[in-house]
Amino acid sequence: MGRWDARQEVSARAGEARIVVLGRSTAQAGTLRRRIERVRLPAEAEHAVTGLAGSFHVLASVGGRVWARGTASAVRRVFTTHIDGVPVAAGRADVLAALSDADPDPGALAVRLLHPPVASTVLADRTFWRNVRAVPPQEALVWERDGRRGPGVRWWRPPEPHLSLTEAAAEVRTALTDAVGTCTAGGGTVSADLSGGLDSTSLCFLAAREADRLVTVRWEGRDPDNDDAAWAARAREALPSATHLVLTGEESPDWFAGVGGLRLPSEEPCARVRDFAKQSDLLRRVGEHGSRLHLSGGGGDEMFTPFPCHLQDLAATRPWRAWRPLSRERHQWRAGHLSVARGVLRRTTYRRWLLDAAGHLTLAPPPGFTGMLGWQPEPRAPGWATPEAVVVMTDALRTAAADSPEPLAPQRSVHCALQQVREGGNTIRVLNQTLSGPDMALPYTDDAVVTAALSVRPLEAVRPGAYKPLLGAALSGIVPAHLLARTDKGPYDADFYHGLRRHRGELLALTEDSLLADAGLIDTERLRRALHHHAAAAELDPLLHTLGCEVWLRSLDGGGPAPVPYPPVTRTR
């Protein structure tokens, strides 16, 4: 049962097997029917969807046994609970919480306050509601005929990073073209961000080849050192058939606009409350131009910029190959010889990393380069977390380590990339639950794209003087060469501090009668002291997670987001 666009449902039946592909996909009923004719076990339902592009749930019943799974990127999830003794599953945790009268879980909220975020791994089988459980993204839910839950079955494994740049580029080109094709296949108008960065620019050129009509949108940043505007203008010139919307700072809401009155009833907190007003305005504008789906470049950084910990992987297997790139990175980050050597030689297990992280929550963050050589960047408690909250955070990390969990992938670089992708997947899922207007799609987080991008040998995807060489090689001939030649991305610090300065009063208002403080998780006086526009960015990095949790708690009494005023003016170019 549910409510969705009928065009996103493809189903088939053969004998005792039924299957539904629900979401954006290349599935066809006839093909599904032929593929499930020989299916006898729930896990075999995966054979029916092998090779499909898109982002979708798979639901199957085989002889009365149920198989359900979402996506490896966490853009689509499966959650479970019991209602009056009956097992129930859903694609939204808050729906199950409402049906079962579940209360919020303060322990999960405490973990969400950590920065960098770790909830996607530490809370892989938990939700932000008591008694509502999550199926880890790489696993499928299996129910027996009598309703008993079978053991978790892993339906997806990350690829071995073994392909050359040329081989991986061919895989990425096919996967990304097909992913964008699932976005344009329904006909009509689609829209896309065109920030000027390589990720969004690439999606615009792919969409322009297939869409009936493409609308691009860009809001101008305030940082004079940000050259995104120039690159976006070049891209617009090369896309003359598209409709281009360009919004100045005065035409689009600031970051943090309206956050004081924001109410976002959703399944979990969302750190994107910072730019909720701006994103709402953007979707409203493209919706007025007829867009039915909006494409965003989120996930591109994670997929095409290998994390420095790939050098730790390399040093463990081929130390003679690691020396030169390590030396280059050390100079770029201005890191000391000794600290780099310690970071590279410290080959801990994932369990040991979790235990170490649990003991380091209140320490100063590790220095830049060496801090990125572990399984993922070590989290830290915000300066305004209470001692009680730190205890809960510590216990959560230690509990996660207690069962000697496997990392998301054997390689640190792949694990780290997947962890970042899943954090983004959780975010876009929640945004689509709360934003009005056309849904947002992130083609870079489609499972086939993730698999293709992570198949490259990391050392080949990092080349001196080249920016995201894998993406550039994959889209050669589709995106103009002069746009693929970009070697950087624009900063947005000025927009952050401008919004912080203008809306500090709204942020301070959130600290009054704070529900997080009532739960014993934050010290509002310390948070107020941190909220000044001269604060270092590192001090304010955890702010977005705290704001997301506070807004979420205030939203539980129902109601939608408070209206945010903005000028109804736009320019078409």
Image (cartoon, rainbow, N blue to C red):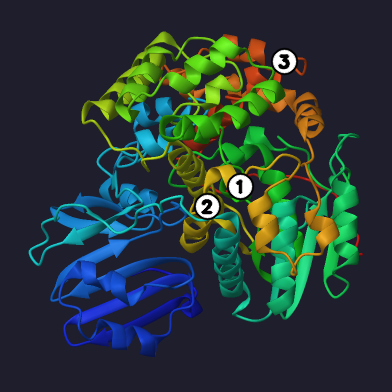
Q: For residue 221, which quarter of the picture?
A: top right
Residue labelled with disc 2: 456
Mark 1 or mark 3: which comes first in sequence? 1
Q: Residue furthest toward the left?
A: 146
Mark 2 or mark 1: which comes first in sequence? 2
Which residue is pictured at 20% across the width and 83% down the height?
Answer: 38
Label 1 to label 3, Cα distance in Å?
35 Å
Label 2 to label 3, Cα distance in Å?
39 Å
Mark 1 Cα-neighbour bin, 10 Å: few <14, some 14–19, many ≥20: many
Q: Amino acid at mark 1?
A: Ala
Mark 2 or mark 3: which comes first in sequence? 2
Badge count = 3
Q: Secondary structure at mark 2?
A: loop
Which residue is pictured at 25% across the width and 79% down the height?
Answer: 18
Q: Secondary structure at mark 1?
A: loop
Q: Are marks 1 and 3 in contact (CB under 8 Å)?
A: no
Residue nearest the observer in this picture, 558 or 18: 18
x and y, in percent, of residue 533 in the image: 77, 19
Q: Is residue 558 visible?
A: no
Q: Amino acid at mark 3?
A: Ala
Residue labelled with disc 3: 535
Eyeballing the image, is 120 above or below 281?
Answer: above
x and y, in percent, of residue 31 in the image: 37, 87
Q: Are marks 2 and 1 in contact (CB under 8 Å)?
A: yes
Eyeballing the image, is 9 above or below 103?
Answer: below
Residue labelled with disc 1: 461
Viewer-nearest of labels 2 and 3?
2
Q: Is residue 42 visible?
A: yes
Q: Amino acid at mark 2?
A: Val
Label 2 to label 1, Cα distance in Å?
7 Å
Which residue is pictured at 85% across the width and 38% down the height?
Answer: 226
Eyeballing the image, is 265 above or below 387?
Answer: below
